[in-house]
Amino acid sequence: MRREFDFLVIGSGIAGLSYALKVAKYGSVAVVSKTEIKETNTAYAQGGISSVMYEPDSFDKHVKDTLIAGDGLCDIEAVTKVVKEAPEQIQQLLNWGTNFDKDESGRFDLHREGGHSEHRILHHKDNTGEEIQRALIHEVKNHSSIQVYENHFAVDVITQHHLGKVTEPWMRDIECYGAYILNKDNGQIETFLAKTTLLATGGIGSVYQTTTNPLIATGDGVAMVFRAKGIIENMEFVQFHPTALYNLSERPSFLITEAMRGYGGILRRQNGQEFMEEYDERGCLAPRDIVARAIDNELKNRGEEYVYLDVTHKDAEETMQHFPNIYKKCLSLGIDITKEMIPVVPAAHYLCGGIKVDLKGRSSINNLYAAGECASTGLHGANRLASNSLIEALVFSNAAAEDAIEKLKDSVCNQHIPDWNDEGTSHPEEMILITQSNKEVQQIMSKYVGIVRSKIRLNRAYDRLEVLYRETEALYQDSKVSEKICHLRNKINVGYLIIKMARKRKESRGLHYNIDYPTKLDH
Ligand code: FAD
Ligand code: SIN
């Protein structure tokens, strides 16, 4: 089966859907989602979306907070772009029907999270992402130019070397013509040809054992671009959220939003002592990397499995009103958060690096854009400021849409692309091989490439992963393509990139903390 579109969008989260809505006025659009349209990291976002709204906040303050969190590696142009364009993109979200909470005077009720010097987080209760996803799906489903393909899994982008078409010195001489997509309902690989393609495939949390990300977060877009020889960067900066609910049987881990610490929540040892002031003068509202590392240190030193987040000193009614979903969730596990402390642990949460893009959202491959969590825009540097990712996805999807629309008149669908050929392959006889390798990847990444790293741990991870890589590539070459084997292959590619870049960084910085390179604070 061959299909042809002006714009191909892989991913149905905030990045993919907002881009689709913008380009749909100019041509035909396909939105591909590997499960249901609503199953995205976006839908799980709790805390909110950052934007300067009222004085005394200012663009300068938001820029400064972002740069401080990014620990010297942010691209100032990307930071300024996101911060300055945020209010306009928030207005666009409101126009699409998103609701954010307001106070009695009619102004937006702004939260504050770790690393933010002002209240600037727009939110919808504690389920902001679900509300944004709802509004976007409603708009997309009502747009006649957009066709949504659920249960369609992108296996690889279609690329060819293209002599002499490099438009920027940093870009590669490679052109993208669409993607090979597995229709999961009939097992066929379809050829989706497009004039321009956007990767909006989200995060990588599932590469780790414990993560706040839904199962879809397997780093497919990053792996596809890596295989297509595009540029991937900053993969060593994986953010661990300090406070996922401690509940061993649950996957993904349920998030306890950082907004709870902004609201006055206090981290305590199991014996009730506060401890964050011992690590950072900003206490519980220090940037995430510092809080996650502090908790990790507490757990290792004390041999305990969780610390507590305490909001029992806050007004019970207010707690229930601000955090109704967290209240309900904890109550279902027998914890009344207005009276009892919440057991929490850090969990893999967000990838700061990914597919390198410029300020127009262009990847290093011609006609291939990337936006959202799979893209590395330069905004986050070595550590993302809380609630800066939803807004980054909107701003960069908008930039990519503007560029793709402008290029449309000069682009054609390449009719010479061959269809997928899987002659001589068969279904793997032993699925247990894939299941077991998958577990091993997650163990390797969690044990050796987590919050605290060392040269020896990284080397060991590299060697172990190499074995899995060889076995999996051999299996892949002989197998009919299935989502399971592709996921494993993608996770191995992503794990490899994280380890490779972590080994290359000979310092501790932001989210990359290596005990062989102590920071000034360690002395
Ligand atoms: P996603 O929303 O993850 O969408 C990815 C899409 O790609 C999905 O539709 C998926 O099916 C599709 N896809 C992936 N691979 C393939 C493939 N091979 N073929 C076809 N389709 C594919 N950020 C904030 O700014 N504020 C917050 O409050 C916040 N809270 C968070 C809470 C949680 C629990 C989590 C997990 C994240 C949170 N984040 C938050 C981060 C933020 O939600 C994500 O970074 C953001 O939503 C990513 O959006 P996206 O559009 O890039 O990807
Ligand atoms: C949270 O609500 O704590 C998550 C915010 C984010 O990841 O930006």
Image: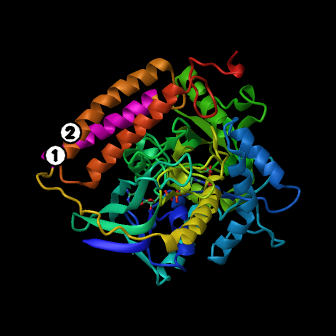
Q: Is residue 81 left or right of residue 1?
A: right
Question: 314 or 35, which lies in front?
Answer: 35
Does 444 lie within the magenta span? yes
Q: Give the label on residue 474, or none.
A: 2
Residue depicted at 68% across the width and 51% down the height = 78
Residue depicted at 15% across the width and 47% down the height = 428
Residue 444, position in %: x, y? 38, 31
| Label 2: which secondary element | helix
Residue contact between numbered discs 1 and 2, judged by CB atoms under 8 Å = yes
Q: Which residues are magenta?
A: 428-448
| Numbered circles on residues, count | 2
Quadrant including the C terminus: top right
Q: Is residue 65 above or below residue 22?
A: above
Residue depicted at 31% across the width and 44% down the height = 488
Q: Is residue 85 left or right of residue 483?
A: right
Q: Which residue is mark 1?
A: 478
Quarter occupied by residue 492: top left
Q: Is residue 152 left or right of residue 72?
A: left
**CA–CA distance in space, label 1 to label 2:** 7 Å
How packed is label 1: few (under 14 Cα within 10 Å), some, or many (20 or more)?
Answer: some
Question: 458 or 24, which lies in front?
Answer: 24
Question: 130 or 163, which lies in front?
Answer: 163
Check disc 2 and give the amino acid type: Ala
Question: 51 or 479, which lies in front?
Answer: 479
Does 54 lie within the magenta span? no
